[in-house]
Structure formats: structure tokens, C-alpha cells
């Protein structure tokens, strides 16, 4: 039973953060392809905007991988719940920030269509959302350091 609880947390870290990234990248890429259908030369500026929401999935995967390394310490329900709980910050922050970052990046794609010289401004705004994914990653990382202690 302990292993199941721990693995559920690990799965959530990877699956929810990955889902947020997939949705976010989809939203941003959909807007970017619309812009490129009119002006294909903007691909370079739109590529980063489309890819940026994908980082949350990477953060979730890294935490899941690190938590898998802690499975040897899962010998009680208390430790299993520590693993599960350590997965939650990146799972939830990754899901929500990935989706919302995709929306910000979609807006940036629209701005790039009309004001290509200002596309860097939309990246700056998207980084504000990224900050919360990084916070979720850091909290999960710090929590996993205390597992089994």
C-alpha cells in the first residue's frame, strides 16, 4: 500500500504538469499557426512563444524522476505520504501555469502578428507565469530533500 501512495504522487507530478504543458503548447501553437498562415516569416519569433509552456512538463518529469529515486526509502505510510505530498506543488503549479502561460503566449503571437518588433515584450509577460511553475518545482524539490528524515 505504501508503494501505491508514493507512485500515485509521482504519477501526478509527471501527468498533471505534462497535461498543463500539452494544453498550453497547444493553445500557443494554434495561435502561432494562425499568424504564420498569413506571414510564414514570423516562424522564428513564434517558435519560442509556442514552446515556452512546455517547460512545466519538464519540471514535472524531473521531480517525478527524483522522487522515483526516493522509492527505496518508502518503508512506511508516513514516508509514502511524504513522497505523495512532495509531488503536489509541481503537479498543481505545472498544470495551472502551463495552461495560463499558453494563453499569454497565444496573446503574444497575436501581438507579434501586428507588431513583430515587440514580440520580446510578450516573452517577458510569459516569464511572469513561468515564475510560478519554478516556485512549484522548487517547493517540490525542497520537500523531497526531507523525505525519510
Image: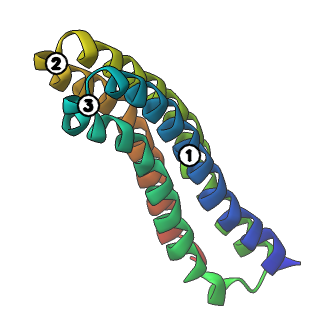
Coordinates of residue 122 in the picture (x, y in percent): 26, 22
Q: Residue at x 54, y 41 (%)?
A: 93
Marks 3, 1: nearer the viewer = 3
Dot 1 falls on a residue whose secondary structure is helix
Q: Which residue is mark 1?
A: 22
User: Quick one: quadrant of the N terminus?
Assistant: bottom right
Coordinates of residue 49 in the picture (x, y in percent): 32, 34
Q: Residue furthest bottom?
A: 72
- Mark 1 Cα within 10 Å, few/some/many (few <14, many 20+)? many
**Image position of 1 (left or right of 45):** right
Q: Which residue is mark 3?
A: 40
Q: Which residue is mark 2?
A: 116
- Mark 3 Cα within 10 Å, few/some/many (few <14, many 20+)? few
Q: CA distance from mark 2 to mark 1?
A: 25 Å
Q: CA distance from mark 2 to mark 3?
A: 12 Å
Q: Residue at x 73, y 72 (%)?
A: 7
Cβ–Cβ under 8 Å for marks 2 and 1:
no
Q: Residue at x 50, y 35 (%)?
A: 97
Nearest the camera: 125 or 84?
A: 125
Q: Residue at x 21, y 29 (%)?
A: 42
- Mark 2 Cα within 10 Å, few/some/many (few <14, many 20+)? some
Coordinates of residue 45 in the picture (x, y in percent): 21, 33
Amino acid at each position: 500500500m505504501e508503494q501505491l501512495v508514493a507512485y500515485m504522487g509521482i504519477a501526478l507530478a509527471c501527468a498533471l504538469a505534462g497535461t498543463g504543458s500539452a494544453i498550453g503548447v497547444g493553445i500557443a501553437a494554434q495561435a502561432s499557426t494562425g499568424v504564420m498562415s498569413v506571414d510564414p516569416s514570423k516562424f522564428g519569433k513564434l517558435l519560442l512563444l509556442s514552446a515556452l509552456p512546455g517547460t512545466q512538463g519538464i519540471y514535472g518529469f524531473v521531480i517525478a524522476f527524483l522522487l522515483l529515486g526516493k522509492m527505496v526509502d518508502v518503508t512506511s505510510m508516513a514516508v509514502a505520504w511524504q513522497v505523495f505530498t512532495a509531488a503536489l506543488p509541481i503537479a498543481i503549479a505545472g498544470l495551472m501555469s502551463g495552461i495560463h502561460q499558453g494563453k499569454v503566449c497565444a496573446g503574444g503571437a497575436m501581438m507579434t502578428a501586428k507588431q513583430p518588433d515587440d514580440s520580446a515584450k510578450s516573452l517577458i509577460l510569459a516569464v511572469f507565469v513561468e515564475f510560478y511553475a519554478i516556485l512549484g518545482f522548487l517547493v517540490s524539490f525542497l520537500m523531497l530533500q526531507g523525505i525519510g528524515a
